[in-house]
Image (tube, helix red, strand yellow):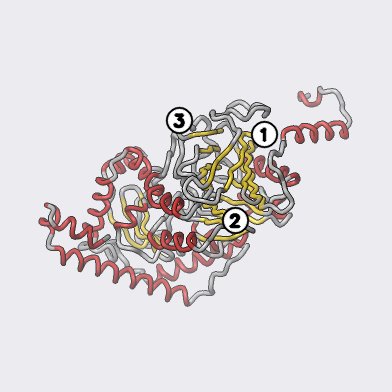
Amino acid sequence: MLGAFITCIAGSTWAAATGPVNLHAAAIDDFNKRVKAYVDLHKKAESGLPPLKKTANPDEIKAAERALGDAIRAARANAHQGDIFTPEAAPILREMVTQYYKQHPAVSTRKEMLDEVPVFKPAVNQIYPEKLAKASMPPDLLKTLPALPATIVEYRIVGTYLTLRDVQANLIVDFIPNALPPAAKKQEDKQ
Amino acid sequence: MTRAHRLPAVPAAILLACCLAAMAAAQELTLPNQPDSVKFAVIGDMGTGDKPQFDTANELAAYHEKFPFAFVVAVGDNIYGSQDMSKKFELPYKALLDQKVEFYAALGNHDDQNERMYKPFNMGGKKYFTFKKNNVRFFALDSNYMDQAQLDWLEKELAASGSDWKIAFFHHPLYSTGGTHGPSLDLRKQLEPLFIKYDVSVVLAGHEHFYERLKPQNGIAYFISGAGGQLRPGDIHQTDPMAVGYDQDRSFMLMEVAGKQLYFQAVSRSGKTIDKGTIAQLDTHPGKDVVASPGAPKKNQPPAGTPAPPPAK
């Protein structure tokens, strides 16, 4: 799917303006490597903690989540926006999101997109606010974006941001600003 | 002096008898309640910790006395906001938990994914999972994040499930006439072909804060049971493909699978039946299942003989 997308946009004005296909492939390849490096860091942080077991005590689950988050934050204390969504990869992923919504113009789809999308300004290493819902990700968009090991990290839409979120530690790992189309921006402005 | 104090004195025993009689009248079980059937309940969007959740949970427990379901399927938004499991799950459903009724939860958009580690939700540490009860195979999906890995897993599990009844449950409805959300079209595009290919009979969802039964789509029965705690009064649009809808109070569902028949009953917070019917599992595809329900095809119109629901608040 990703290959088809890159081939598809290679002939477009956008692709012509931003560079040849192999550069896009290289940027996505680099993104995937950075995701893998993050997953390795996550696993290393996890290995230094008592294993989280299935439990009837929710406090144990929350404590494990916080401990993992703390360990990851400590290991990534100098992390910045763009470390994983690099300046080379971000415009490609942003274009994937744009293309998805262009291909799904139905009002109902836009409604789905905006339905309960949480609105806040994300920051790297921030805990995803516990009280806010998580916007469901459109399956077709997930098919377009580079696949993630979703038991550890996932894409989530926050306002007009595309974020990378650590599922187990509930942390914002990285984000791309202005990734969502203007309808989402209008919604964000209202709130 | 309060109004209650001005009421004539009535012996407690008489009051209790009156209350029990009223409850019995409200709790009309329409399911066959056969000894060896698979009996379960369905709730969704319940985890608020507020009074309506407790009321609905109490009614569910009251029905359990008559219809001893072994487990409850929760279609997501199990816990809203902070993970106060005590207030939002353990206390409301204490009567059921004390009687060893199991809960199987799917994740909603308000749920913390780490709920998968919470033992009473029986998720086995997974965001999506499957389990079997006699001749019924259940598929709990994470509709918040339907990526290729989950779709591949689902297809593999469906293919391996043989001739069992197949019931899928997840949060976002593929069909809905709700004004606030409506159907999840993108999700439908991915899941419906699999459901048809592998003979899924029943799909249970929440997200919409009401009860709705849709007209069968491609031989599949779709239900929304998303008013276990939350409610969005007046949100159902009386349009196709709604068969029966109820958005005037909280509700839950009871289901019973006996051989090739699945019986369902939807019940309001006050214990009144708001929908009921039967689904027959046929042997061949297509059109394998036929929904034959006596339910009136109108919004907020319970079947004949059912007391009128309470007025909108």
Residue at 31% across, 52% down: A161
Q: Are marks 2 and 1 in contact (CB under 8 Å)?
A: no
Q: Nearer the viewer, mark 2 or mark 3?
A: 2
Looking at the picture, does residue B246 appear above or below residue B150?
Answer: above
Q: Amino acid at mark 2?
A: Val
Q: Chain of mark 3?
A: B
Could you say where residue A162 lies in the image, as x and y percent from the top left? 32, 54
Q: Are marks 2 and 1 in one subunit? A: yes
Which residue position holds label 1?
B272
Is residue A161 something one can see in this rendering? yes
Which secondary structure, mark 3?
loop
Which class describes the residues within 10 Å of circle 3: few (<14), some (14-19), or many (20+)?
A: few
Spot occupied by residue B151 in the image (x, y as percentages of width and height): 41, 59
Vertical order, A126 against B311 (above or below) = below
Residue under label 3, please give it: B239
Q: Residue B81 or B195: which is nearer the viewer?
A: B195
Query: Residue at horizontal 35%, vertical 70%?
Result: A38
The image shows residue B269, relative to residue A123, as above or below, that is above
Residue found at x 71% / y 39%: B29
